[in-house]
Amino acid sequence: MKRILLTSIYLCSFIMAEGSISGIGFFNYTYDLTKDAMNDDGFRLNRVYFTYKNSISEDLSVKFQTDVGEVGGDERLTAYLKKAQVDWKFPFGKIILNHPH
């Protein structure tokens, strides 16, 4: 069992070392001019997407995208996997494994 776990960790670290990571964030700025306003002024982060892409070879590529944001009116930020995709090309076609949100 240890050998399988170590091999999996090694392969994942090898794959992740070569790719690119990008992200985009959405926020707003709030300022309340009323006298009895609570001190809730300032920038507020609404949503952030982190994306990892890697072309392991000419025939194999992977893409993972996470979504971080508020869920159901809760002010805490929650992260979840938005998209996972593997593209694998063969001489006779292409296989796409996709996990959409």
Image (spheres, rainbow, N blue to C red):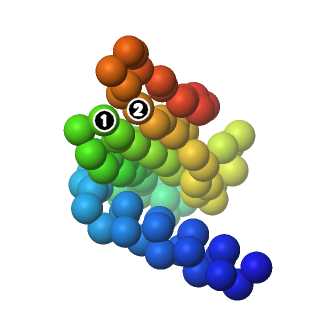
Q: Nearer the viewer, residue 33 or 19?
A: 19
- Above/below status of 26 relative to 21: above
- Above/below status of 39 relative to 23: below
Tell me which residue sits at (46%, 37%) in the image: 86
- Above/below status of 69 relative to 89: below
Q: Nearer the viewer, residue 100 or 70?
A: 100
Question: Can see residue 27?
Answer: no
- The extreme bottom residue here reads 2
Mark 1 residue type: Asp
State left or right for residue 7 relative to residue 33. right
Mark 2 residue type: Trp
User: Residue 26 location in percent, x, y?
Assistant: 35, 43
Task: From the image, tell me which residue sits under label 2.
Answer: 88
Question: Can see residue 59?
Answer: yes
Would you identify the image quadrant in which residue 1 lies? bottom right
Which label's residue is closer to the chain start, 1 or 2? 1
Tell me which residue sits at (48%, 59%) in the image: 40
Tell me which residue sits at (39%, 43%) in the image: 62
State left or right for residue 53 relative to residue 84. left
Tell me which residue sits at (37%, 68%) in the image: 14
Q: Are marks 1 and 2 in contact (CB under 8 Å)?
A: yes
